[in-house]
Image (cartoon, rainbow, N blue to C red):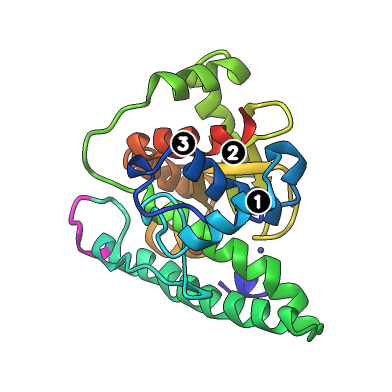
């Protein structure tokens, strides 16, 4: 936990809409255009100034399942405490709670850092937390939101995207796990907008090995606080934790998130 506090994928600042299915394709793409602009991807989306304004006007209604919430000029922490009450989740309430405390702190810190930077208050806190805390918030958001004990399945598009890079799901998943075993922070399945392919990105902290032009769809937290207290120390314990995590992935949501970020590439 100390390690995580001292450090922070993708600088994902999604301005998604609350009910994208109810919006026109133009409105939806406009919303993603703001995200792309924030990531320096405006040339990829060819988003006009008019469309950006439309997107900003929609920013108060995020898709709360897929993306962090940004409304009234700041990020808002989601309530993931229900995860601590699912008896067969496989991850203890204490484990989940350890992340939640960090997550809410990151939301506060990135709000503060953005406010400071907007006023050109450049110091160690604003510089570090603009990326570190934003990523700490965004990555935990995907990690928690993707947990379910319900039966889910991968979409045809997700299967195709996995096969495109890895040849098979088994190869993909082995790569996700192997990557997780090598790092102290995150193993992240993300869409590379430069080539439209999925890869698993390794990060020792929220903001190390920062990959530009990638959008996360599945996030595996392997910080010590995610598994050490419940599963014990060592590689065998870490693999046991990852095995438990693998059984509660909400593939429906991962598939929907891929659909959303694919619109940035297409
Ligand atoms: Fe965490």
Number of marks in picture: 3
**Which of the labelled discs sits on residue 58, or is there none?**
none
Q: Quadrant of residue 133?
A: bottom right
**Which of the labelled discs sits on residue 25, or is there none?**
3
Tag 1 or tag 3, which sits nearer the N-term?
1
Determine crowd level at label 3: few under 14, some 14-19, many 20+ residues with C-alpha closer than 10 A: few
Residue located farthest toward the front when viewing the structure as drawn: 50
The residue shown at (37%, 60%) is: 230
Q: Is the magenta stretch mostly helix, strand or loop?
A: loop
Please name the residue that numbered disc 1 is placed on: 10
Give the percent coordinates (x, y) of residue 116. Answer: 70, 84
Q: Nearer the viewer, residue 30 or 141?
A: 30
- Label 1: state its secondary structure: loop
Q: Quadrant of residue 171?
A: top right
Magenta part of the chain: 84-88
Q: How far apart are marks 2 and 1 (CA)?
A: 9 Å
Labels 3 and 2 touching (C-beta < 8 A): no
The residue shown at (41%, 44%) is: 240
Give the percent coordinates (x, y) of residue 223. Answer: 55, 59
Q: Which of 50 and 34 is in front in this view?
A: 50
Give the percent coordinates (x, y) of residue 137. Answer: 53, 65
The residue shown at (67%, 67%) is: 132
Give the percent coordinates (x, y) of residue 246. Answer: 39, 38
The residue shown at (39%, 45%) is: 20
Question: Does 93 appear above or below 256?
Answer: below
**Which of the labelled discs sits on residue 190, or is there none?**
2
């Amino acid at each position: 936990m100390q390690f995580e506090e001292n450090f922070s994928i993708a600088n994902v600042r999604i301005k998604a809409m609350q009910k994208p299915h109810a919006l026109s394709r133009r409105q939806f793409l406009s919303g993603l255009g703001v995200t792309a602009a924030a990531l320096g991807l405006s040339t990829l989306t060819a988003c006009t100034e008019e469309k950006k304004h439309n997107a900003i006007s929609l920013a108060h209604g995020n898709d709360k399942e897929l993306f962090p919430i940004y409304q009234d000029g700041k990020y808002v922490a989601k309530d993931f405490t229900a995860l601590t009450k699912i008896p067969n989740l496989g991850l203890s309430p204490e484990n989940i709670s350890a992340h939640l405390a960090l997550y809410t702190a990151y939301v506060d810190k990135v709000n503060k850092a953005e406010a400071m930077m907007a006023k050109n208050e450049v110091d160690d806190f604003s510089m570090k937390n603009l990326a570190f805390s934003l990523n700490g918030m965004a990555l935990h958001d995907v990690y928690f939101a993707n947990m379910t004990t319900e039966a889910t399945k991968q979409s045809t598009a997700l299967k195709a995207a996995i096969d495109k890079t890895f040849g098979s799901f088994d190869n993909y998943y082995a790569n996700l796990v192997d990557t997780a075993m090598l790092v102290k922070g995150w193993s992240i399945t993300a869409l590379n907008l430069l080539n439209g392919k999925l890869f698993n990105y390794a990060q020792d902290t929220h903001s190390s090995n920062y990959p530009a032009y990638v959008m996360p769809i599945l996030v595996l937290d392997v910080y010590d606080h995610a598994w050490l207290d419940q599963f014990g120390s060592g590689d065998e314990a870490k693999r046991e934790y990852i095995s438990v995590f693998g059984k509660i992935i909400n593939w429906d949501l991962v598939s929907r998130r891929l659909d959303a970020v694919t619109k940035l590439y297409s």
